[in-house]
Image: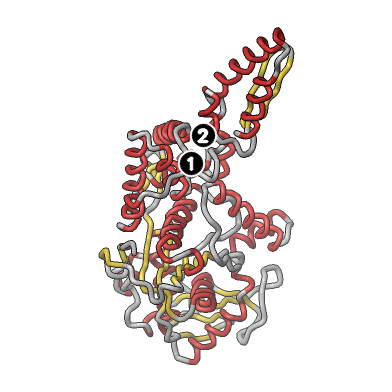
């Protein structure tokens, strides 16, 4: 079996991955708060953990891996968006959730096994909060329920900071009803304008952190294999998840993976700098999803990633070249699997594809592209626009038709048209000439026999 090593943030070292149960490998990744389009930085963890999902499925079997990524669909930003637009919260979150799924699908990502919406698991969150209160780890005050941070002695172990250091260096909400500045909200009251659910503490809604603890427990059990997310979630979100779950007696996640952040042209993405854009912005500008994914995979997930126009251009040129070389019949190279098994070394996996291209191994190139999520069953349509082979074949068909009009034997014309159709090419013939257009299912490998 392929050896997998992963950098465990909790231990700050690479270690062999040994699942709790090889027949039931379980992974949880923090998903989006769905109030607007996903920006480019939001997409990085999606691609990172999609790659890990693919690797785990390859090693342990698709039926033996469970991947959970949640939707946070109750949040003050969503409430504000609803108030501004006059639309219902559910309308907004239904729309933005679908936007998210569509945009991530354009990046070649597989859908997780489960995608729970927070609002559909309120009862389970209430039950967990009740359990924390009963154990002395949480308390009710002024309609709020708060977690006693100092009741969990290992708080801060993941991020490597003490509670006192966190208070000195972090922005914490100061509120008169808190016993300690570091205590965080598990439940908060709702007014008539904000969404709310009945609870033992009155009508209200959950805090952010309790969502993932409750949903991961319900869908993956008390202890599971991997928890992932961006570096920015280590504190406070992941620290708070650990505290809540461990204080309920749950083992929670054994391995923690965090991806580094994204920059644009060497600078932090920011609206004020004019370098902020969503995934949809890029797609609408004509940047193919495969190119975005390629640029992401070119940098190791634990290194900061810099999105640049140069990288986009180089990525698109490389993929266009590779797509013209692919052939059927290959199996994914063990060198690719080995690279990914070494802490998701996607840069190393792409290096294997570069070697395959140099060796003119079109079959190995296609199988590798498919495994990395850079290609489906056929070459994407954007990569074959202006395909040189089609221009050559259009001239061939035109010349063959001209000759057939003199001999009245159109059998070779019909043969070429049938072969082009079988390769997914739309043939348009008129008095002015012949046009060949790639259609759905276009497969350039089937053009080889026509040259």
- Do we see residue 103 in this rendering? yes
Q: Residue at x 56, y 33 (%)?
A: 382
Q: Position of residue 40 (x, y in %)?
A: 49, 47
Indicate left or right for 382 with 166 as reference: right
Tell me which colouring the rendered structure shows: secondary structure
Cβ atoms under marks 2 and 1 closer than 8 Å: yes
- The quarter of the image holding the N terminus is bottom left
**Residue 345 vertical placement versus 183 (above, below):** above
Q: Earlier in the sequence, mark 2 or mark 1?
A: 1
Front position in the image: 37 or 202:
37
Q: CA distance from mark 2 to mark 1?
A: 7 Å
List the residue tagged with mark 2: 445
**Residue 171 vertical placement versus 264 (above, below):** below
List the residue tagged with mark 1: 328
Front position in the image: 351 or 90:
351
Q: Secondary structure at mark 2?
A: helix
Q: Position of residue 45 (x, y in %)?
A: 44, 56
**Residue 148 vertical placement versus 335 (above, below):** below
Q: Residue at x 54, y 59 (%)?
A: 32
Mark 1 Cα shell of 10 Å, populated few (<14), some (14-19), many (≥20) = some
Q: Name the residue at the bottom extreme.
A: 134
- Do we see residue 181 in this rendering? no
């Amino acid at each position: 079996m392929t050896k997998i090593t992963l950098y465990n943030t909790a231990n700050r070292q690479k270690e062999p991955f040994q699942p709790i149960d090889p027949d039931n490998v379980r992974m949880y990744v923090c998903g989006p708060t769905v109030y607007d389009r996903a920006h480019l930085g939001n997409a990085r963890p999606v691609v990172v953990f999609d790659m890990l999902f693919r690797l785990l499925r390859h090693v342990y079997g698709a039926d033996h891996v469970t991947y959970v990524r949640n939707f946070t669909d109750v949040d003050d930003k969503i409430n504000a968006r609803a108030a501004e637009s006059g639309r219902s919260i559910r309308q907004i979150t239904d729309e933005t959730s679908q936007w998210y799924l569509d945009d991530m699908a354009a990046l070649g990502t597989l859908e997780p096994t489960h995608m729970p919406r927070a609002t559909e698991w309120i009862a389970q969150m209430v039950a967990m909060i009740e359990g924390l209160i009963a154990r002395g780890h949480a308390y009710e005050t002024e309609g709020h329920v708060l977690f006693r941070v100092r009741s969990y002695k290992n708080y801060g172990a993941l991020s490597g900071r003490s509670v006192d250091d966190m208070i000195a260096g972090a922005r914490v909400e100061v509120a008169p009803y808190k016993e300690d500045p570091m205590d965080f909200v598990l439940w908060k009251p709702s007014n008539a304008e904000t969404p709310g659910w009945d609870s033992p503490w009155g009508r209200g809604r959950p805090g952010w952190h309790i969502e993932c603890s409750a949903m991961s427990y319900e869908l993956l059990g008390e202890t599971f294999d991997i928890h992932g997310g961006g570096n920015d979630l280590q504190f406070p979100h992941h620290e708070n998840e650990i505290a809540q779950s461990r204080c309920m007696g749950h083992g929670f996640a054994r391995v923690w993976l965090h991806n580094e952040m994204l920059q644009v042209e060497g600078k932090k993405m920011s609206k004020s700098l004019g370098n902020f854009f969503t995934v949809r912005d890029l797609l609408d500008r004509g940047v193919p999803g495969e190119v975005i994914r390629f640029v992401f995979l070119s940098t190791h997930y634990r290194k900061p990633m810099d999105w640049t126009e140069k990288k986009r251009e180089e990525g698109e040129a490389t993929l266009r070249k590779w797509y013209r070389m692919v052939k059927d019949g290959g199996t994914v190279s063990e060198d690719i699997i080995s690279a990914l098994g070494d802490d998701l070394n996607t840069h190393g996996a792409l290096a294997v594809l570069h070697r395959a291209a140099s060796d003119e191994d079109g079959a190995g190139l296609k199988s590798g592209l498919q495994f990395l999520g850079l290609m489906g069953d056929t070459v994407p349509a954007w990569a074959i626009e202006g395909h040189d082979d089609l221009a050559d074949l259009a001239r061939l068909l035109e010349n063959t038709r001209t000759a057939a009009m003199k001999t009245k034997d159109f059998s070779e014309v019909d043969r070429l048209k049938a072969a082009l159709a079988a390769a997914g090419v739309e043939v348009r013939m008129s008095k002015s000439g012949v046009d060949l257009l790639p259609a759905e299912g276009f497969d350039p490998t089937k053009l080889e026999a026509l040259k």
